[in-house]
Image (cartoon, rainbow, N blue to C red):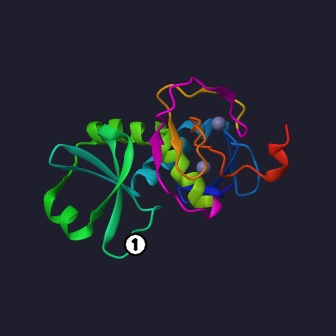
Amino acid sequence: MDRVEVEYKGKKYVRHGHDWYSSIGEKTPELQSILNEKLLAHENEKLWVARLNDQTLVFDKRIPPSGEIVTFWYLEKDQFINLERDHARSNSISIQDQAQKTKILEKYRGSSVVRHRLKLQTMGKEYSGVRYSANKVRRETNCWSCKSPITSENLPECVTCGWILCSCGACGCGRSDQLWQD
Ligand SMILES: [Zn+2]
Ligand SMILES: [Zn+2]
């Protein structure tokens, strides 16, 4: 897990689980909501929201561009698309309205496709995309990672392993071989 740190009034605070601690390790429940808000604002700075024709796009600085190709999350389709940097730059209009931006970023954060991509990123694995299964048989299972129940209906699956994406973003790619034997 990444170390999550926020500065507030000249002091540093660290988050463990859902709790915040001061630099000397004291729990600071009274600052919980302020620090969470600060963290969200800080994370939002790494996200850029724009309109390109009729598409709403989010650019996440945690997903590095490769050369002239930049990857955007395409809200209306809940998928990632690659665009040429210059094309995107000259044709998109950045969304400045805070309320609108917040709404879009909430959807971004709630997307299993986004969680999936960032999960692979932190595992150092390549993202090959997601697809909606042509298999009409309803599959029902529990996520090996977070244990939540998942069904295959209308859920995207990982192109690499063919597993349904859980809302936590996990597919079969992060699962170790020993766990297969059940
Ligand atoms: Zn899960
Ligand atoms: Zn996978």
Residue at figure coordinates x 45%, y 43% from the top left: 131
Quadrant assignment for ligand 1: top right
* Nearer-the-camera pick, 74 or 28: 74
Q: Residue 114: x and y, percent? A: 48, 46
Give the image location of residue 134, x and y in percent: 46, 34
Q: Which one is in front, 145 or 126?
A: 126
The C terminus, quarter of image: top right
From the viewer's perspective, tell me whether residue 16 is left or right of residue 9: right
Task: Answer with the quarter of the image where residue 140 lies.
Answer: top right
Q: Amino acid at mark 1?
A: Ser
**Residue 180, image x and y in percent?**
80, 44
Magenta residues?
123-145
Location of residue 7 with respect to 21 vertically, above or below: below
Is residue 68 a member of the stretch shown in magenta?
no
Residue 37 visible in the displayed image: no
> What predominant SS class does the magenta segment belong to?
loop
Q: Please identify the quarter of the rendering in which residue 104 is found.
A: top left
Q: Secondary structure at mark 1?
A: loop
Using residue 76 as the reference point, say whether residue 131 is left or right of it: right
Q: Nearer the viewer, residue 181 or 65?
A: 181
126 up-or-down from 140: above or below: below
Read off the residue under disc 1: 66
> In this rendering, is residue 20 above or below 61?
above
Residue visible at 61% across and 41% down? 163
| Residue at image coords 32%, 69% | 69
